[in-house]
Image (cartoon, rainbow, N blue to C red):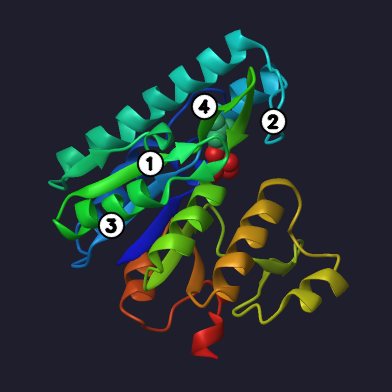
Amino acid sequence: MILIKLGGSIITNKEKPLSVRRKTINKLAKSLKKINEPMIIVHGGGSYGHYWSVKYNMHTKEKKYDLRGVAIVKNSMIELNKIILDSLLKNKLNPYCLPPTDFMSGNKPISKKVKEIEKIAKSGLIPVTYGDALWYGQKKTYILSGDKVMTHLAKILRPRLCIFVLNEDGLYSDLKSKKLIYELRDKRYLISENKMDVTGGMTRKVEEALKISKIGMNVFFVNGNKPERILKAVRNRKFKGTLFRGKRNV
Ligand code: IPE
């Protein structure tokens, strides 16, 4: 089984609030159709969820955020999710919509529910979930990123492979020249190299990718504008992207 995260930067236009990249989404769906293996899809918020969370000053920390913001972020994620589901359906895939509330309780995944997601994927349906605004408890809420969802699912399900689909070739060691890191070996390298493109959104992705690779799975960062690279990663062929080699594969 494989876990795929469609980053907000590839499925939406991050420069423009509430705008999707329909053509790219369709191209991605067409590539995913060629994967003959159970898979779970997670998607990000991009110019939908992130736009509203910034507007309402909502973050990953559990707090008493503006309830209006919670409602609007959730609604915008449903809207983006529907666009993804429609595209998958149109391309003859069978998505199974799973909002994160289905398998999260507070900020913890419900193991039994997550294991059920695996069964759904193995039946041939494609579970699709996403980052969202979530209830935490005691009137507090928080933003759960799709990247974190990837780690939660990977820890419990131990997929063969995790892929983060980005709007970039991978992780760069130098932002200006876009020098690609083909393999990130360990965290010390990351800390000592401060010129890397690991600010903001990328930092979180790298953190989650390192966590997943540490528990043994290979993680790939690939450019979703070149969807064939996703297929190459799945088929274990040489391709352009960044690999976080899982410990058990070293
Ligand atoms: C975003 O999820 C969730 C919300 C802002 C509601 P992600 O943090 O995974 O989104 P991207 O992929 O970085 O856009």
Residue nearer the viewer, 238 or 109: 109
Image spot of residue 27 (x, y percent): 30, 50
Q: Which is closer to the viewer, label 3 or label 4?
A: 3
Amino acid identity at mark 2: Glu
In this figure, which residue is indicated by the disc labeled 1? 129
Identify the mark at residue 118; answer none if there is no mark: 3
Q: Callout 1: few (<14), some (14-19), or many (20+) C-alpha neighbours within 10 Å?
A: many
Asked if disc 4 and disc 1 are in contact, CB closer than 8 Å, the reply is no
Asked if disc 3 and disc 2 are in contact, CB closer than 8 Å, the reply is no
Identify the mark at residue 48; answer none if there is no mark: 4
Residue nearer the viewer, 225 or 246: 246
Identified at 63% across, 68% down, the residue is 210
- Element under label 3? helix
Amino acid identity at mark 4: Tyr
Asked if disc 1 and disc 2 are in contact, CB closer than 8 Å, the reply is no
Write down the quadrant of residue 90 in the picture: top left
Identified at 65% across, 61% down, the residue is 206
Label 4 within 8 A of ligand 1 by Cβ:
yes
What's the CA distance linking mark 3 and mark 4? Answer: 28 Å
What's the CA distance linking mark 3 and mark 1? Answer: 13 Å
Disc on the earlier residue, 3 or 4: 4
Identify the mark at residue 62; answer none if there is no mark: 2
Image spot of residue 55 (x, y percent): 68, 18
